[in-house]
């Protein structure tokens, strides 16, 4: 079982969309029916992620088992945080968005984060209050809960950050 990450290409769009739909089903099965609804992320968002070189696939034995967007900050929705504060507001950071996997996969966040932390030492991520599996994965990975942010449409999200300082 060899896992590796690669950038998604335009030819990967159907696979990315299938993984996003799988992510929706997994969220609903785990008591989180509202985070993505039926229309988020949009096909246009995924196409933009791919065109901008920010869409990635986690591969295992030649098959795509997860997708995510890994985007250099700043993220406009992270400019204001309520009921808390970011660990650090001065250093550059990356944002992890649109994480989704095939059903029945395990250790996805560990594999994704292992890759992402080879590119940066400062990652921010947000999730819906009902997304208990993601909250658990972030806690296990050593992320710190920082407070509440609001998406552009006003929806509330729980915000997390992890910084790995060089020794």
Image (spheres, rainbow, N blue to C red):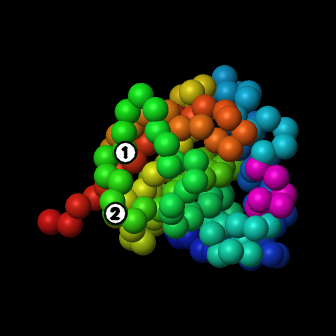
The reply to whether residue 130 is visible in this rendering is yes
> Which of the numbered marks, if any, corresponds to residue 146?
none
Displayed quadrant of residue 104:
top right
Q: Is residue 116 left or right of residue 165?
A: right
SS under mark 2: loop
Q: At which x and y percent is residue 82?
A: 46, 32
Q: Is residue 84 left or right of residue 77?
A: left
- Looking at the image, the residue that sits furthest to the left is 167
Q: Which image quarter is the C terminus in? A: bottom left
Q: At which x and y percent is residue 44?
A: 83, 61
Frontmost residue, 133 versus 91:
91
Q: Mark 2 = which residue?
A: 91
Q: Residue at x 68, y 44 (%)?
A: 152
Q: Residues within 10 Å of mark 2 (few under 14, many from 20)?
A: few
The majority secondary structure of the magenta stretch comes to: helix
Q: Mark 1 = which residue?
A: 86
Residue 72 is inside the magenta segment = no
Q: At which x and y percent is residue 49?
A: 70, 67
Frontmost residue, 73 versus 44:
73
Displayed quadrant of residue 139:
top left
Q: Residues within 10 Å of mark 1 (few under 14, many from 20)?
A: many
The alpha-carbon separation of the residues under discs 1 and 2 comes to 11 Å
The reply to whether residue 134 is visible in this rendering is no
Q: Residue at x 66, y 67 (%)?
A: 55
Q: Is residue 166 left or right of residue 129?
A: left
Mark toward the start of the polypeptide (1 vs 2): 1
Classify 109 as above or below 139. below
Q: At which x and y percent is residue 131?
A: 59, 31
Q: Residue at x 51, y 61 (%)?
A: 74
Magenta segment, which residues?
A: 41-46
- Looking at the image, the residue that sits furthest to the front is 80
Q: Residue at x 77, y 59 (%)?
A: 45
């Amino acid at each position: 079982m060899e896992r590796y990450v690669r950038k998604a290409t335009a030819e990967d769009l159907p696979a990315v969309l299938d993984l996003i739909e799988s992510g929706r089903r997994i969220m609903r099965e785990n008591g989180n029916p509202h985070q993505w609804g039926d229309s988020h992320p949009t096909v246009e968002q995924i196409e933009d992620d791919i065109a901008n070189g920010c869409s990635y696939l986690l591969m295992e034995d030649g098959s795509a088992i997860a997708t995510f967007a890994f985007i250099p900050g700043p993220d406009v929705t992270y400019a204001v945080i309520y009921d808390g504060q970011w660990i650090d507001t001065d250093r550059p950071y990356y944002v992890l968005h649109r994480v989704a996997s095939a059903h029945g996969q395990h250790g996805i966040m560990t594999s994704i984060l292992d890759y992402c932390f080879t590119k940066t030492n400062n990652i921010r991520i947000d999730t819906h209050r009902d997304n208990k599996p993601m909250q658990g994965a972030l806690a296990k990975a050593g992320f710190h809960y920082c407070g509440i942010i609001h998406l552009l449409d006003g929806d509330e999200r729980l915000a997390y950050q992890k910084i790995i300082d060089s020794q």
